[in-house]
Image (cartoon, rainbow, N blue to C red):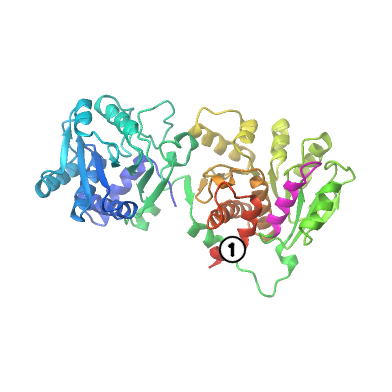
Amino acid sequence: MKIFSAQQLKQIDEETIANEPISSLDLMERASMACTKRIMKLINTEDELIIFCGKGNNGGDGLAITRLLLERGFICHAYIINYTDKFSVDAKANYDKLKTIYTSSFSEINSLSDLKEKITRKNYIVIDALIGTGINKIFDGLLKDTVTFINANFSRVISIDVPSGLFIDESSDGNENIICSSLTLTFQFPKLAFLFAENKKYVPEFEVLDIGISSETIDKHSTNFYYTTKQDVASFLKPRNKFSHKGDYGHALLLAGSKGKSGAAIISSKACLRSGAGLLTLHSNKSTVNGLLHHLPEAMSIEDSNPDFISEVDKPEKYDAIGFGPGVGTEEETQTVLKKICQYYAGKLIIDADGINILSENKTWLDFLPPETILTPHPKEFERLVGKQENDFEKIKALKHFCLKYFCIVVLKGAHSAIAFPDGTVFFNSSGNPGLAKGGSGDGLTGIILGLLSRGYTSPKAALIGTFIHGYAADLCLKKKSMESILISDVIEQLPIAFKKMEN
């Protein structure tokens, strides 16, 4: 699914109106109906709603939603915020419709005192339709007062398209005049700002509503940003040939674990074999190798000559894919092993955890990385690689530059993990939940991607599939477990079901 800028969204609307053909008013009605249908599923008939409407097209959506809800017997009232004298053409048309049919269903607000006088209760469900993607400055005056009033008085707020006041193409850091929504119902495409942690209090949840924009129109517009969906990932999966054997699905080498960190290696090993690798060899220290036999007899192992950490690697070139990093530590000998792999191994490589920390201390080694090496840092590890950025938009710019410079793939882990490629494209993941915010989750992700690399997927597809499946398996855990209780072991146990559902 593509992610577009505000300017592109405007162009797409204009092309839809010109080519479908459909009037701008009818397109607004279609979008408003999509919102109304979703809102009806989120509320009860006895709930009371108030809709805050601006005077532009977002306000027009709000006025249309008010009318459509009233037609269906819901209790609602629109408050029109007169921060300007003029309605947009389509907002005025919807104002006139509402005024003609439901003469007492709206009130006009000219000041903060009007708001305080006319809205004295706090048990309403609020619909925010003040300003959409067309915002170009921080709110002041009556709009600022209205946002402050809503945020101070209401806990359940549904924003239409965008939480009012939020910039979608640049950072809103430092801007407090933004609606803190509970849920945003956005039209056709996710917005880039929704996917960043800096906006978590404004967009804790969002849903994308299909408003019927044609695929031909969407295809004409290019972008570097995408939102990975279940349908996208399912289309990447390859069936197994019934005449195949284990050798057809590759031999993976995992260098993981050290004294006190055997769990990371075992977690990653389990995830690797659950993700399709034909063969797996774990190279680790003695205690980790001994533990592997009890936890995963299907894997093979190489015991390092050092009893505490990895100090050597033998013939890495014979493996189809290599994973390095979970729990390995940063001993000097371990660092040398990574350097050797980067310099002399030409196959598929994924580096995680301590492997990334080693690279951040030896940045010249980044030039040795095999093409399309996958790095899977969490935000602090990425900061060690590239330095601290002022906001999430700047971080994405740094991410794109890093991947271009070193011709690598980076999975920047987070609520919507960003998977960036050397060609400048960035895919944001749609699966997963906060139950993954626990030790071991990253080790599991490394193992999943390593298994996919070994099994024959290209590095870009392995990164996309692996990140989605990791989150999807965690989502399946929620059917039986709370987010508080999920362990990465539970997620790995759900991998067979996750793959099965995706294959079907």
Q: Label 1 belongs to which residue?
A: 497
Residue 223 image point, x, y percent: 44, 45
Q: Where residue 477 appears, x then y in whole percent? A: 56, 55
Q: Nearer the viewer, residue 45 or 30?
A: 45
Q: Residue at x 77, y 62 (%)?
A: 298
Query: Magenta residues?
Result: 257-273
Q: Quadrant of residue 172?
A: top left
Q: Is residue 32 left or right of residue 394?
A: left
Residue at disc 1, secondary structure: helix
Q: Is residue 298 visible?
A: yes
Would residue 338 be found to the left or right of residue 51 on screen?
right
The crowd level at tag 1 (other Cα within 10 Å; few <14, some 14-19, many 20+) is some
> What is the three-letter code of the residue carrying label 1?
Ile
| Residue lying at the far bottom of the rendered structure | 243
Visible residue check, residue 83: no
Residue 353 appears in which quarter of the rendering?
Answer: top right
**Relative vertical location of residue 273 with respect to residue 102 in this rendering, above or below:** below
* Residue that appears at 74% across and 67% down: 246
Q: Main secondary structure of the magenta part?
A: helix
- Residue 491: image x %, image y %? 62, 54
Indicate the position of residue 405 as horizontal and vertical percent values: 61, 37
Q: Residue 271's quadrant in the figure?
A: bottom right
Specify whether residue 271 is painted magenta: yes
- Between residue 204 and residue 306, name the one nearer to us: 204
Classify 163 as above or below 19.
above
Q: Nearer the viewer, residue 418 or 474?
A: 474
